[in-house]
Amino acid sequence: MRPEIRVLVELGRLPSEDDAEVDLLKKFDTAYRKIEPPVSDEEAIALVELFGDDGCFGLASSLMHLVETAPGWPVEDVLAATDNPWILELKNRATRGGLLQE
């Protein structure tokens, strides 16, 4: 895993918009912007673990697009956790795109 992705993973789950502190959001944004797509399958799997409960001011959406750049995407094992709305959206997008069977 590339160091710039490891930094993002070490920050943990994206904070909710209600609880996010500006300094933490800046750390997430800075780390995210250092990542050059595409990501590897391993990196995509790690990044999926970062989705929180809301959009985190657009960062979740950006992260979703980054995950989708992995060459082996979709990784079906990762998409089994449909209790998270962002993972569910990734699964739905893969299905609509013909990459995943329902």
Image (tube, helix red, strand yellow):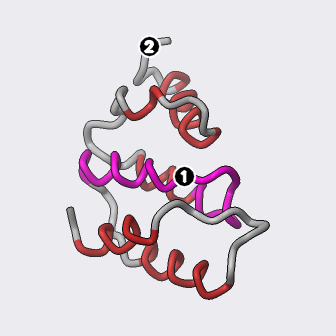
From this view, report whether residue 77 is shown above or below residue 18: above
Mark sitting on residue 65: none
4 left or right, relative to 1: right
From this view, report whether residue 16 is shown above or below residue 65: below
From this view, report whether residue 45 is shown above or below residue 8: above
- Tell me the quarter of the image containing the N terminus: bottom left
**Secondary structure type for disc 2:** loop
Task: State which quadrant residue 77 falls in.
Answer: top left
38 left or right, relative to 54: left
Q: Name the residue at the top extreme.
A: 102
Secondary structure of the magenta portion, mostly?
A: helix
Question: Which residue type carries mark 1?
Answer: Phe
Q: Which residue is mark 2?
A: 101
Sooner in the amino-acid sequence: mark 2 or mark 1: 1
C-alpha distance separating marks 2 and 1: 23 Å
Magenta stretch contains residue 102:
no
**Secondary structure type for disc 1:** loop
44 left or right, relative to 102: left
Comparing 61 with 9, the one in front is 9
Residue at 45 percent of width and 26 percent of height: 80
**Position in image of residue 92 (x %, y %):** 57, 27
94 left or right, relative to 42: right
Q: Which residue is mark 1?
A: 51
Residue at 48 percent of width and 56 percent of height: 50
Q: Circle 2: is it few (<14), some (14-19), or many (20+) Cα within 10 Å?
A: few
**Position in image of residue 35 (x %, y %):** 36, 71
Question: Which residue type carries mark 2?
Answer: Gln
Magenta extent: 40-61
Magenta stretch contains residue 46:
yes
- Label pair 2/1, CB-CB below 8 angstroms: no
Residue at 36 percent of width and 49 percent of height: 69
